[in-house]
Image (cartoon, rainbow, N blue to C red):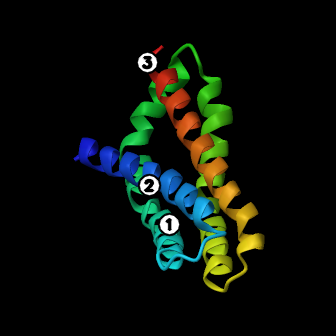
Amino acid sequence: MRDLVYFLHLILGFALVALPVIVLLNLGKKTAMLKPMALLAAAISWVLVVPAGILYMTFYPATKTLIKAGAWPWAHSILMETKEHWGILLPVVASVAALLTVTGKNEQSKKWWILVIVLSVLLAVFGRIIKMGAFQ
């Protein structure tokens, strides 16, 4: 169960980096797929909360103990707290970006899509560092 949820989390997280990049690259073009891709990215950001919540609520307490006992206890104290808050913010940011794209405000949406990409990548890096902290 844990591995299935974890891989779903990874795949959705990767999609949440890839789709905004595709949307960003196509903002200046007249393509029929721009709006559906924007909406899909926003939807994925909300769906991603489910496996993240399952991992956090079910499996993270044991991992937290390992991290705090490991060589990098700061990984939990700093990065996990940041990751929790940014992870909750990410679907809102992606939804704003998608709404701006769907309403044709492409120039305004660029900054929001860049923010989605940056947040997604940072959350992935933070997650990896936290996981490394459990096993160092």
Mark earlier in primary sequence (1, 2): 2
Badge 1 density bin: few <14, some 14–19, many ≥20, Cα 10 Å: many
Relative placement, left or right, of 63 versus 95 is: left
Looking at numbered disc 3 in the image, what kind of residue is underneath it? Answer: Phe
Disc 3 target residue: 135
Badge 2 density bin: few <14, some 14–19, many ≥20, Cα 10 Å: some
Badge 3 density bin: few <14, some 14–19, many ≥20, Cα 10 Å: few
Residue found 50% across the figure and 63% down from its top: 45
- Disc 3 is placed on an element classified as helix
Task: Please name which of the two marks, 3 or 2, marks the residue nearer to the observer.
Answer: 2
Disc 2 target residue: 15
In the rendered image, residue 14, in percent from the top left (x then y), is placed at: 44, 48
Residue sticking out furthest to the left: 1
Asked if marks 1 and 2 touch (Cβ < 8 Å), the reply is: yes
Mark earlier in primary sequence (3, 2): 2
On residue 41, which mark appears? 1
- Disc 1 is placed on an element classified as helix
Looking at numbered disc 1 in the image, what kind of residue is underneath it? Answer: Ala
CA–CA distance in space, label 1 to label 3: 32 Å
Residue found 75% across the figure and 61% down from its top: 111
